[in-house]
Image (tube, coloured by chain):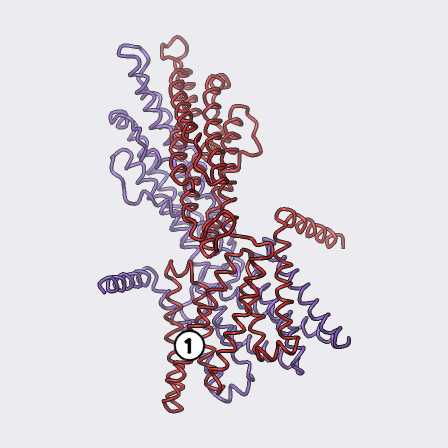
Chain colours: A purple, B red
């Protein structure tokens, strides 16, 4: 009993969390409900019903299957479905006409053979990366429609009429989906991708500053782990890029917006996130340099990290505004300077080897200070590389 | 013309490449063809046709939609579809019975309202991570079936018969799919996951050895970039883990095989791959230490890398055989020793600061040697950690 109540409470909390994280998800759920209720009207109201024939349920099916969260997803599935239904329907009718010229047994063999061959070929074609990316759903619908038309044709006499009706109801379903998806609070994959990329650049900046500060303060900043989000966002990014390609121009994006640049930008940022990962590893490592050593290097390192973070934030701002920044180049220059300074200060940290104290101790100390400082330097040189790469990608 | 020929040739090459990379993909394509041809027989042959009624096309649709490359994928979709069709069908018939008690207008309102509410609620539930992972397809089919039953009920009188027929044909489709998918050359997601994980451990070992050798030789080993595969395999791994959960026991795996361990193992290996990434960054960096310095450290470093690679290969072998290894712990001990040795030799590399030559030069040199050697040390300490983590995960 209590366990059930606790579960319900946890479920409610989760609903509230998902809804408050992204209210568009609630809107999406209502949009699906509205669209389905709308499509059902085609069936309930007799005049409409007579218009599209008894195959109105195809419209319902289409809506359920193609309505996706993003407008790009709905467009991808809708256009795939329309094209596949049309071509497969035409091919099915053609094969059927051809088969009907053969006798009864011949018809069965031709139809079944065509189903076998086409299903095999199209199934195999889905393993091609290019087809998988943009036409996976279309391939499924192609097989589906072809089989249905070929198989139905064996029993139903008015095959062409049937195929036509099916096509028209599917198109009605797709049209309603697209209208609702794109006109009522649309969720654009492109916009999401844009915000994700800019947000990731900010997260990297926070994470970088947090890690370096945490390293010298000894306490971990809550934002230091932001790089993990960036490392894990590859799959989401790839799918958004694929969906964004299908979207028409919206807001500040034109139809042929260079979406693949976001992919390159994402890769560059993940490259950067690898470095921060290494840095964070130093922060949580058991082997730590003595505080005194740390202090001597902290100024230069903090300056480097804040400069780099500034460059990253400027990049994020550039992405948001879709403008080339004038200050970005300058910031990158400063970053390189700061990196050079860290490198200059580094050798001075090492106790000179004049053997006045226990030599072993000095060696150990020296060793430690290296371990502490070195990833920063390695990191800095890579970081100085990243904004340069990022710069070339900034849009427009 | 020539361009077309070139394109066809390129296409053929690609087909040959995909087929030779994984012949199971060709088999899969034929399996789809055979299954569809088999299901079509239900429609072509009259006795069977009379048995399942005019809704035989539902069987065809089911086969096209649920037949996936892996057995786990087919099981996931098949079981989801069966459960969703059953529950949604029952619910649809129930709602319909309830609605028929109201008048004509009331019926329409109740049915349309139920469609709206259920579609909204179920659409929203798909955003829950747990549902998304295991029941996403079921949620779609639930909405689909409910809408179809509710909507059809308004016109068709023998609703229960219709629902029954639909359920039985869907079940026939699912059964044929599962039989073909699991009995004819099955592709188990679990087995693929197992091979992927073991292969990744081997790739890490090759990549580690390749990077370190390349660093001292100056020429890049072709296998050094294997870590990139490991970094990119997260999405594939996650989906395989989700699908493997649905599979029954097969080969050496029992039904409740601890698949989530593979996820943790994968994360540990990606952790390791980050280190190799950093190491590889040193290899391609512009700033290189003088050859002489490199030579002095090369023995210790090569020993460390070959020990670590051995430990990784032993881990891969453990995963393959699903046994705890007796030598693994010993190998990890050796790795730690080698890491300690590198750390010991490191300070000796630095020219003592006795200012006999140009001090600036010595400092520069010292600096360089640090840059060169340090990632190895940082890396070694993390690497020494990894096999320890891996060890706890080794199955059985």
- Location of the N terminus of chain A by quadrant is bottom left
Circle 1 residue: B90
> Between A211 and A59, which is closer to the camera in this rendering?
A59
Give x and y (percent) for residue A98. Answer: 75, 74
Residue at the extreme bottom of the image, as rendered: B103
Residue at the extreme top of the image, as rendered: B356
Residue found 40% across the figure and 36% down from its top: B391
Against A213, residue B183 (above or below) is: below
Which picture quadrant has residue A194? Answer: bottom left
| Left or right placement of residue B187 versus residue B92 in this view | right
Q: Is residue A186 visible?
A: yes
Give x and y (percent) for residue A18. Answer: 33, 61
Which picture quadrant has residue B41? Answer: bottom right
| Left or right placement of residue A85 versus residue A217 in this view | right
- Identify the subunit bearing mark 1: B
Circle 1 crowding by C-alpha within 10 Å: few under 14, some 14–19, many from 20: some
> Between A304 and A123, which is closer to the camera in this rendering?
A123
Residue found 47% across the figure and 45% down from its top: A267
Give x and y (percent) for residue A207. Answer: 34, 42
- Secondary structure under badge 1? helix
Residue found 40% across the figure and 18% down from its top: B345
> Between A216 and B265, which is closer to the camera in this rendering?
B265
């Amino acid at each position: 009993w209590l366990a059930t109540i606790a579960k319900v409470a946890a479920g409610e909390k989760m609903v509230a969390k998902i809804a408050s994280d992204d209210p568009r998800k609630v809107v999406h759920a209502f949009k699906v409900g509205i669209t389905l209720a709308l499509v059902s009207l085609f069936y309930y109201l007799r005049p409409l019903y007579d218009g599209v024939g008894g195959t109105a349920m195809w419209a319902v099916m289409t809506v359920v299957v193609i309505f996706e969260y993003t407008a790009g997803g709905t467009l991808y599935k809708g256009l795939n479905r329309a094209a596949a239904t049309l071509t497969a329907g035409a091919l099915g009718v053609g094969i059927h006409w051809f088969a009907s010229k053969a006798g009864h047994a011949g018809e069965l063999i031709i139809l079944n053979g065509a189903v076998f061959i086409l299903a095999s070929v199209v199934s195999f074609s889905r393993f091609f990366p290019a087809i998988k990316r943009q036409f996976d759903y279309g391939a499924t619908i192609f097989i589906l429609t072809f089989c249905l038309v070929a198989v139905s044709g064996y029993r139903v006499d008015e095959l062409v009429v049937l195929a036509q009706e099916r096509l028209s109801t599917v198109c009605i379903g797709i049209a309603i989906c697209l209208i609702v998806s794109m006109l009522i609070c649309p969720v654009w994959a492109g916009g999401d991708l844009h915000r994700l990329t800019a947000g990731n650049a900010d997260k990297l900046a926070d994470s970088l500053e947090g890690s370096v500060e945490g390293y010298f303060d000894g306490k971990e900043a809550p934002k230091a782990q932001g790089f993990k989000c960036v490392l894990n966002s590859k799959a989401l990014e790839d799918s958004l890029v694929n969906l964004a390609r299908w979207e028409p121009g919206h807001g500040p994006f034109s139809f042929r917006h260079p979406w693949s640049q976001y992919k390159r930008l994402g890769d560059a940022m993940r490259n950067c996130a690898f470095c921060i990962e290494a840095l964070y590893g130093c922060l949580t490592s058991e082997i730590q340099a003595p505080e005194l050593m740390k202090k001597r290097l902290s100024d230069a390192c903090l300056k480097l990290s804040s400069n780099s973070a500034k460059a990253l934030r400027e990049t994020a701002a550039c992405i948001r505004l879709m403008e080339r920044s004038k200050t970005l180049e300058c910031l990158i220059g400063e970053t390189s300077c700061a990196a050079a300074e860290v490198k200059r200060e580094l050798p001075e940290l090492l106790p000179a080897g004049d053997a006045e104290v226990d030599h072993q101790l000095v060696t150990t100390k020296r060793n430690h200070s290296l371990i502490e400082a070195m990833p920063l330097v390695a990191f800095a040189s890579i970081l100085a590389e990243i904004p340069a790469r990022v710069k070339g990608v900034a849009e427009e």
